[in-house]
Amino acid sequence: MMARLLPVFLAFCLLGLLEPGVKAMAQENNAVEEIRKRIREREEEAEEQAREDEPEEEEEDGCFDLGCQLFAEILGELLRDPSSPLRGDPPPGYSSWGNLGLDLDGAWLLQERWSLAGRLTLNLSYLHLHAFGQLLFDPTGYLLCGATNAGLGFRGPFLFLNLFAGIFATDSSDRALLDFGVEARIFLSPQWVLELYNLNAAYYALRFHFLWLGLRYAGSHAGLGAGLNLSNYAGILLVGPSLRLSLWL
């Protein structure tokens, strides 16, 4: 079943990235300069929206509480079900107590735009912690962003799944944003791993989205991968091919 669904899943993901890729090719080489300008504009819009929506905070809190309750129920079912595919022994190369990992990515975001990203991850049983950083640069300058996150992690013989939330910030704004995301690793075999990493940060009109989807060849404690990097900085989409080096204990 996994072998049949995998090509469909990959085709769906690639089609979803087609439109952003076309838009990214149309972007000028002054992407960093334009992103900084867009962040300032969206931050002003977000401040206005926050002032207008103050009376609605109680209703929003109710929706948030409902979402948290649903999330907790789903996780509870996964924990209680001994036959869940998220339970079981980890793949070769990962210890039973958890793992410490480092992922380093380099991406060409078309034209003269490049990005370097790193992620340090610690998994201890069901606890997941990680720090994320990305440097975007082009001929007009650079933009640095980063996040620290904590959440829940589930490990099994074929799947690693981490759900997390935390704080996100950029060097273009003094405001720290709440973020959330998911990381999934599907072990097609002990050596071949399909990886997905998604991070989202939002404060009203000011939003950031990061996605990495690719395939990695893994040894016992190191691996090399290739995939697609999609970054949305306050509405400006950049996408391109990426290479990844992974190390873990």
Image (cartoon, rainbow, N blue to C red):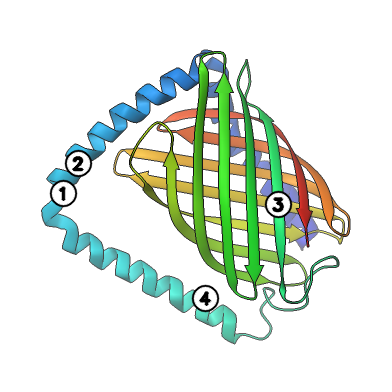
Relative side of 102 to 19, left or right: right
How packed mark 4 is, by other alpha carbons closer than 10 Å (few <14, some 14-19, many 20 or more), is: few
Circle 1 SS class: loop
Distance from disc 3 to disc 4, alpha carbons, whole Å, reads 26 Å
Image quarter (top left, top right, bottom left or bottom right) of the N terminus: bottom right
Distance from disc 2 to disc 3, alpha carbons, whole Å, reads 38 Å
Distance from disc 2 to disc 4, alpha carbons, whole Å, reads 33 Å
Q: Quadrant of residue 228?
A: top right
Name the amino acid type tagged 2.
Answer: Gln
Relative side of 204 to 136, left or right: left
Circle 2 SS class: helix
Lower sequence index among marks 3 and 4: 4
**CB under 8 Å between discs 4 and 1:** no
The residue identified by callout 4 is 75
Residue at point 53% right, 16% down? Answer: 26
Lower sequence index among marks 2 and 3: 2
The residue identified by callout 2 is 49
The correct choice, above or below, for 114 with respect to 151 in the image is above
Label total for image? 4
Lower sequence index among marks 2 and 4: 2
**CB under 8 Å between discs 2 and 3:** no
Lower sequence index among marks 1 and 3: 1
Name the amino acid type tagged 1.
Answer: Asp
Distance from disc 1 to disc 3, alpha carbons, whole Å, reads 40 Å
